[in-house]
């Protein structure tokens, strides 16, 4: 029997894909991003997770279907949903059978099986940590090899992409960095929009509670208006 480990479910998400969405947060992530605001999702088994079969989860999601309207649906986030590939794939298949729009919010760092997953995925929200090898490792502590494999699979499948990139003061906020990101994104197909996400400190207290050192302790939050000009530029070049 396939089971999935779920951190939480948000019933009325408005920023994780088009329309009104139910957002399912999966447990488990191999990356250790310096600005991660969900360190409580890193472990696959936290002791507080909810355990579902695919059928149980989709039956729960069907309760929210009347709120989706023409544009909404379900977004699978995390953690990293790709790490629970068999469970995710079956949930996606059942959602599509039920006529629910499906979206994966991912950093692309899973464990394979991407072609089957993408066959039932309408949209990918792809979190690009950095466009260079050294920069990616500095932010995540990992190699970008798995990310590149997932990106290749997305490109082959032709799945629409919304790109997300966290902008951190002193780390990824320089004009040179954002220009490099822009150039990198022009090598990727099927991008429908790019969202620059200003760094915030809302997850810092979780690190304190879990006894985990937080490497950006003294970094201030980035005001959204600081990204307005760059966001407009990305909108002009990539927004569909």
Image: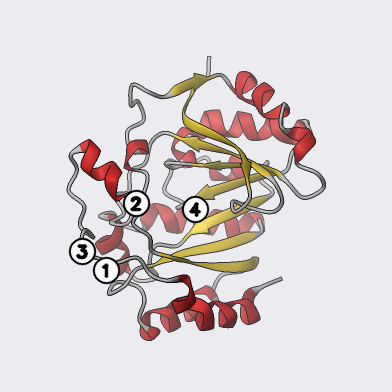
Which residue sits at x=66%, y=43%?
21
* Mark 3, other Cα within 10 Å: few <14 / some 14–19 / many ≥20: few
Asked if one can make out residue 100 in the rendered structure from this viewpoint, the answer is yes
Instruction: Using the image, determine if residue 164 lies above or below residue 176.
Output: above
> Alpha-carbon distance for marks 3 and 1?
23 Å
Q: Position of residue 157 (x, y in %)?
A: 65, 54
Q: Give 90 or 138, whichever is nearer the viewer.
A: 138
Residue occupied by mark 3: 218
SS at circle 3 = loop
Q: How far is the residue under mark 2 from the one under mark 4?
A: 20 Å
Residue indicated by mark 1: 134
State the CA–CA distance, disc 2 to disc 3.
Answer: 15 Å
Q: Earlier in the sequence, mark 3 or mark 1?
A: 1
Residue on which disc 2 sits: 36
**Along the polypeptide, which appears first: circle 2 or circle 3?**
2
Q: Which residue is mark 4?
A: 150
Chain-order first, disc 1 or disc 4? 1
Q: Residue furthest top?
A: 1
């Amino acid at each position: 029997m396939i089971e999935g480990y779920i951190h939480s479910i948000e019933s009325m998400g408005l920023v994780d894909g088009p329309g009104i969405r139910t957002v399912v947060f999966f447990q488990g992530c191999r990356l250790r991003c310096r600005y991660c605001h969900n360190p409580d999702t890193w472990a696959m088994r936290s002791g507080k997770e909810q355990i579902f079969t695919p059928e149980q989860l989709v039956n729960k999601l069907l309760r929210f279907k009347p709120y989706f309207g023409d544009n909404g649906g379900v977004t699978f986030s995390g953690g990293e949903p790709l790490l629970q590939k068999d469970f995710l794939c079956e949930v996606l298949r059942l959602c599509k059978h039920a006529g629910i729009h499906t979206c994966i919010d991912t950093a692309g760092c899973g464990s394979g099986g991407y072609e089957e997953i993408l066959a039932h995925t309408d949209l990918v929200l792809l979190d690009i940590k950095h466009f260079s090898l050294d920069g990616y490792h500095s932010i995540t502590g990992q190699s970008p090899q798995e990310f590149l494999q997932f990106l290749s699979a997305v490109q082959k499948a032709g799945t629409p992409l919304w790109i997300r990139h966290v902008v951190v003061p002193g780390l990824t906020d320089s004009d040179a960095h954002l220009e490099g990101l822009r150039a990198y994104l022009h090598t990727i197909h099927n991008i429908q929009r790019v969202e620059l996400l200003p760094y915030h400190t809302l997850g810092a207290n979780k690190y304190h509670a879990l006894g985990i050192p937080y490497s950006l302790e003294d970094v201030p939050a980035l005001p959204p208006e600081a990204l307005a000009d760059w966001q407009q530029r990305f909108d002009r070049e990539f927004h569909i």
